[in-house]
Amino acid sequence: MSTARPLRVARILVALTACLALVAACGNDESGSSTSAAQATGAASSGTGASPSSAAAGQDTAAATAVAESSPAPSQGAGTVDDPRLPAMPENTEGADVNSARAALIGFFTPAAFEAPGPAFDISTLKKPVWFVTATSQFPVVPYVNAAFQAAADAAGVEAKICPGESTTADNALCIQQAIDAGAGSLLFFSQDPSTLAEPLKDAQAAGIKVVSGNNALQIGDPPDANTDASVSHDYYGAGVINGTYAVARFGAATNGLCLAIPEFKVTGSVCKGFTDAVKQYCPDCNVTTKDIAVAQLADQTNAIVNAELLSNSELNFVMGSVDDFCGIAAATVQRVKPGGGVVCGGQNGTVDALTSIKNGGFQVVTAGQNTNWWGWAFFDATARAQAGAIGADAVITAPNQLFTAESFDYTGPIDYDNTDQAYGIEPSLYQQGFQDLWTK
C-alpha cells in the first residue's frame, strides 16, 4: 500500500459519517420505499425517511407503504418546470415524472434555516466540563469542526476539552478514560463505531457522564445507540434523496445510477438508500445499482468497480458517492473509460474538493453539503444539552443539508474551510445566535 493510501482511507473514515457508524451494507435492493417530493424535502432538512437497513425497513413497513401511496404518478403532458438553477430539461422523459423531480429540486434550494434542537435551557447550570472526543485530523474538515466546538464553548462560558480520538478504538477509549478521570459532565465521541466502545462508554455512564453519539444515526429521530444518552447527526438519507432527485431532473428517464457505499459504515448505506428511493420515486423503471467498497481497499476497489460498471453498462451516467471523496477517486477512471462528460458524479459532505469541482465544471456536479462551522456548534450544543438534561434521546440534526449544483453555484470567493460560511451563503449569526438564544431561559 502506498503512503498516500492510508491518508485517503483515514480521510474517508471521517467523511463517511464524519462520525462513522456500525457495520452494515446498503445492499442492492433497487425497489426500496418510495419517497414523495414533500417527504423528500422533509428528509433533506429534518432527516425523515425510511431506514436503510433491512431490519429497520421491516419495522417501517406501514410507513413505507404510506410513502409509496403518496408518490406522484408520472406527468401527463404537464408543462416544463424550469428555473435557471436547474439542469437543462432532459430529452427522454417518457415514464419519468421529471417535472416533479425538478419542482422538488427547486425546493431544496430553500435557504438554510435554524431550527431549535430542543428547548431553551440555562447553560450556567453546567458545573462540569464538556469533552469532545474528536476524529483524526488527517481529514481536513476536522480541525475546523474542533475550532467551531471550542468557539461555541467560549461563547457559552463553558469549560471544554477536545481530546484526539484519532478515529481508533484505542485512542477513543483513552480519551473517554481521561474524561472520567477529569470529572467531565458530558462527552461527545466522533467518527467511531459505538459498539467498539461498549465498555468505555459503560464506564463513563457509571461515572455520571452523559454520553452523546456524533454522526452515527441512520436518520434523524433514530433512538440512541447502546451505552449512549443522546445522538446528533447529519441527515444522510436526506443527502441521498437530494442527489437522486437531481439525477432524474438532469437525465430524466435515461437516469442510470451507480451508488458506492462502504459496508463497514452503515450511514453510507443510508445515503445510497435515499438516492435509490428518490430515483425510483420519480423514475420507477430507471436503473440504480449499489456496490459495496471495502474501506481497506477503497481506492483500488472503487476504480475497479467503476471501470467494470462502465464497461458492462454503456448507459451508466450517474456515479453517486456516499461521500464526496468517491468522486475524486473515480474521476480519472471515468475520464479514461468514458471521456466526453457523459458521466457525472454526486456526493455528500460539501468538501472543498467537491465544491471546487462543481464550481469549475468538473466530474462532480452536485453535493449535499453540511456547514462545518454550524456542525461544530451543533456538536457543542448537544453535549451541553446532555449534561443539562435538555435533549431527547432520539437523534437531532447537526446542520441542514445544503444543495450545491454546477448550474446554481455562483459563489466567486475562495473555496476553503476558512470561508465555509461565505461559500454556503450563510451569516454566522444564523446558527451562532440561534444556539445562544437557547442557552438562557
Image: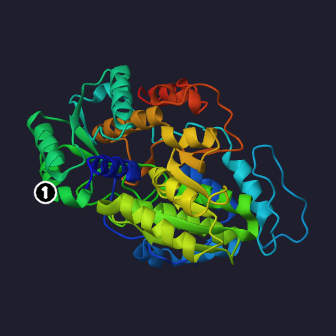
Q: Position of residue 79 (x, y in %)?
A: 91, 60
Q: How many marks?
A: 1
Check the image and report above or below for 246 versus 142.
Answer: below
Q: Position of residue 204 (x, y in %)?
A: 15, 47
Which quarter of the picture shows residue 436? top left
Which quarter of the picture shows residue 154? top left
Circle 1: residue type: Glu
Q: Position of residue 161 (x, y in %)?
A: 22, 30
Quadrant of the snapshot with the N terminus: bottom left
Check the image and report above or below for 138 versus 81.
Answer: above
| Helix, strand or loop status at disc 1 | helix
Quadrant of the snapshot with the C terminus: top left
Which residue is identified by label 1?
199
Front-most of residues 140 and 272: 140
Q: Is residue 269 visible?
A: no
Q: Residues within 10 Å of mark 1 (few under 14, many from 20)?
A: few
Determine the residue positioned at 75% across, 49% down: 86
Q: Position of residue 224 (x, y in %)?
A: 33, 57
* 189 displayed left or right of 376: left
Determine the residue positioned at 56% across, 73% down: 311
The colour scheme is rainbow
Check the image and report above or below for 198 versus 412.
Answer: below
Q: Is residue 54 visible?
A: yes
Front-most of residues 191 and 136: 136
Check the image and report above or below for 167 versus 61.
Answer: above
* 47 displayed left or right of 107: left
* 297 displayed left or right of 280: left
